[in-house]
């Protein structure tokens, strides 16, 4: 791959990966080794998180189309070797989180990918891109579950910061779905959402306790789109910058 053509983004916008039974199978050992290496890299390159997690779903029976998608991530990495996480020196200690989901985004089982990230000031300290464990029956449910995951991570980070002597009154959690936000604030369960597992309702308790304040964010400012769906180059580059993944040459 050293002489390969560079790619602008890790995942093509028209990428709809499925089991692809008609394609030829590739060496599963080689494929798993590639995915394992890229999963390790996501610790410092969160901009590749969605693409790597997408390819990781097919490790048991990889096909040529899956291997091609994995190699595209390498092409993207080849063109962005100077890019990495940047942590500025600042005194603004404010913890904020973002949550998002792509309703029935997985073509295998129609489950919804979720994404979360948390900023301490302007520094990214936690991020996650994961397929939800259950099939959501609506966009509201998918967004609500994603917000619940972000809430759990927010509470954990808040307690971790207390060990370092940093006490925060409230964590701001941003979501781009007003119905999901209303659901977190409404103590009365509507008949249409009674099927949602009880474990997802704990976000309400923390909102009532004042640990979390959930806020609406416009879709164009929903940074976690980077972790839930393929994006065009301009949109991808904008969100990558917001993520704090910058070209070190421009900084130095």
Image (cartoon, grey):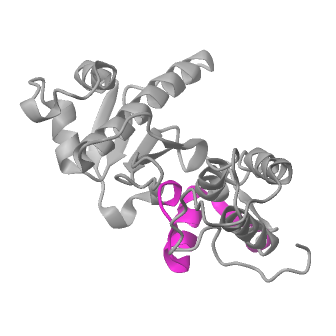
Q: Nearer the viewer, residue 153 or 133?
A: 133
The residues colored magenta run 226-252
In the picture, residue 97 is in which quadrant?
top left
Q: Specify the quadrant that holds the C terminus.
A: bottom right
Q: Nearer the viewer, residue 99 or 129?
A: 129
Against 163, is 52 above or below? below
The x, y position of residue 173, in whole percent, is 36, 40
The x, y position of residue 75, in whole percent, is 77, 73
Q: Residue at x 52, y 37 (%)?
A: 93
Q: Residue at x 34, y 52 (%)?
A: 103
Based on the picture, tell me whether residue 156 belongs to the magenta stretch.
no
Horizontal side of 99 relative to 238 (left or right) equals: left
Q: Residue at x 24, y 25 (%)?
A: 204
Horizontal side of 11 relative to 96 (left or right) equals: right
Determine if residue 91 is in view. Answer: no
Based on the picture, tell me whether residue 247 belongs to the magenta stretch.
yes
């Amino acid at each position: 791959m050293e002489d390969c053509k560079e790619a602008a983004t890790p995942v093509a916008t028209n990428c709809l990966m499925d089991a692809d039974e008609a394609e030829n199978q590739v060496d599963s050992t080689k494929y798993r080794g590639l995915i394992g290496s890229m999963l390790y890299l996501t610790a410092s390159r969160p901009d590749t998180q969605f693409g790597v997690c997408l390819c990781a779903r097919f490790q048991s029976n990889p096909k040529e189309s899956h291997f091609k998608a994995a190699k595209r991530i390498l092409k993207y990495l080849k063109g962005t070797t100077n890019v990495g996480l940047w942590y500025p020196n600042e005194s603004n200690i404010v913890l904020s989180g973002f949550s998002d989901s792509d309703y029935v985004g997985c073509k295998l089982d129609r489950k919804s990918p979720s994404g979360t990230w948390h900023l301490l000031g302007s520094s990214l300290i936690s991020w996650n891109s994961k397929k939800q464990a259950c099939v959501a029956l609506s966009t509201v449910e998918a967004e609500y579950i994603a917000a619940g995951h972000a809430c759990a991570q927010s509470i954990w980070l808040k307690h971790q910061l207390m060990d370092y002597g940093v006490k925060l009154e409230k964590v701001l959690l941003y979501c781009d779905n007003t119905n999901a936000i209303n659901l977190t604030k409404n103590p009365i369960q509507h008949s249409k959402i009674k099927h949602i597992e009880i474990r997802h309702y704990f976000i309400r308790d923390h909102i009532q306790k004042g640990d979390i304040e959930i806020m609406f964010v416009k879709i164009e400012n929903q940074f976690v789109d980077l972790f839930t769906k393929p994006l065009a180059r301009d949109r991808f580059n904008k969100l990558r910058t917001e993520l704090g993944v910058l070209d070190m040459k421009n900084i130095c």
